[in-house]
Image: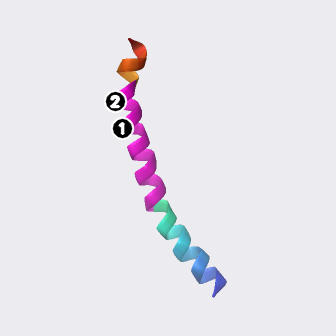
């Protein structure tokens, strides 16, 4: 039961993490030109 829960939580956490990193990269890409000015 525990291994099943950890596997499901890991599969749930991975898309969230990739989405967060993608959003973070997009935000950095938008802010970066302002940081260069």
Say whether residue 13 is left or right of residue 22: right
- The label on residue 14 is none
- The answer to the question of whether label 1 and label 2 lie on touching residues, with beta carbons closer than 8 A, is yes
Looking at the image, is 14 positioned above or below residue 19?
Answer: below
| Percent of width and height locating residue 13 | 51, 64
Q: Which residue corresponds to mark 2?
A: 30
Q: x and y percent of residue 9 in the render?
A: 54, 72
Q: Is residue 20 magenta?
A: yes
| Disc 1: CA contacts within 10 A as few (<14), some (14-19) or many (>=20) | few
Which residue position holds label 1? 26
Q: Residue lying farthest bottom?
A: 1
Q: Secondary structure at mark 1?
A: helix
Q: Secondary structure at mark 2?
A: helix
Residue 36 within the magenta-colored segment of the rendering = no
Q: Position of residue 1 (x, y in %)?
A: 63, 88
Magenta stretch bounds:
15-31
């Amino acid at each position: 039961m525990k291994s099943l829960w950890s596997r499901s939580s890991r599969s749930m956490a991975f898309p969230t993490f990739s989405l967060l990193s993608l959003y973070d990269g997009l935000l950095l890409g938008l802010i970066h030109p302002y940081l260069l000015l």
